[in-house]
Amino acid sequence: MKNKLFGEHIQPNCNYCDNFNRNDNNLGCIKNKQIKNGKCRKFAYNPILRMPKSEAKMMQFKKEDFEI
């Protein structure tokens, strides 16, 4: 059994679909489809197009925070 990169079930999102047209003047599906009820028949997941979540910001500590 093959392991999926991001799990078994990927929610359809046009931002990381191979069929999404990314031209500057025309955004939309190449296959003229849209997500209905959380599903798209022509959704083709491409993990390279997925943007990683931003990192959590580190908290700033003072010297006084470590004193007993």
Image (cartoon, grey):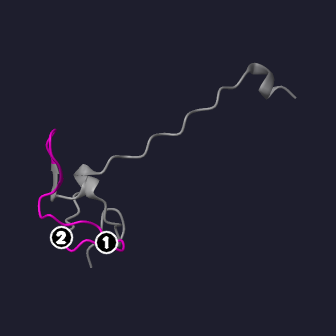
In this picture, residue 6 sits left or right of residue 43? right
In this picture, residue 28 sits left or right of residue 66? left
Foreground disc of the pair 1, 2: 1
- Residue at point 42%, 46% (across, down): 53
- 65 is within the stretch colored magenta: no
Q: Report how many numbered discs are placed on residues in the image.
A: 2
In this picture, residue 52 sits left or right of residue 35? right
Residue marked by disc 1: 36
Report the front residue among 49 and 58: 49
Q: Secondary structure at mark 1?
A: loop
Residue 57 tag number: none
Q: Secondary structure at mark 2?
A: loop
Instruction: Name above or below for residue 48 compared with residue 56.
Output: below
Q: Amino acid at mark 1?
A: Lys
- The part of the image, by quadrant, that contains residue 25 is top left
Q: Quadrant of the N terminus?
A: bottom left
Labels 1 and 2: the sequence-earlier one? 1
Residues shaded magenta: 22-41
Residue 42 tag number: 2
| Residue lying at the far right of the rendered structure | 68
- 35 is within the stretch colored magenta: yes
Q: Amino acid at mark 2?
A: Lys
Q: Quadrant of the C terminus?
A: top right
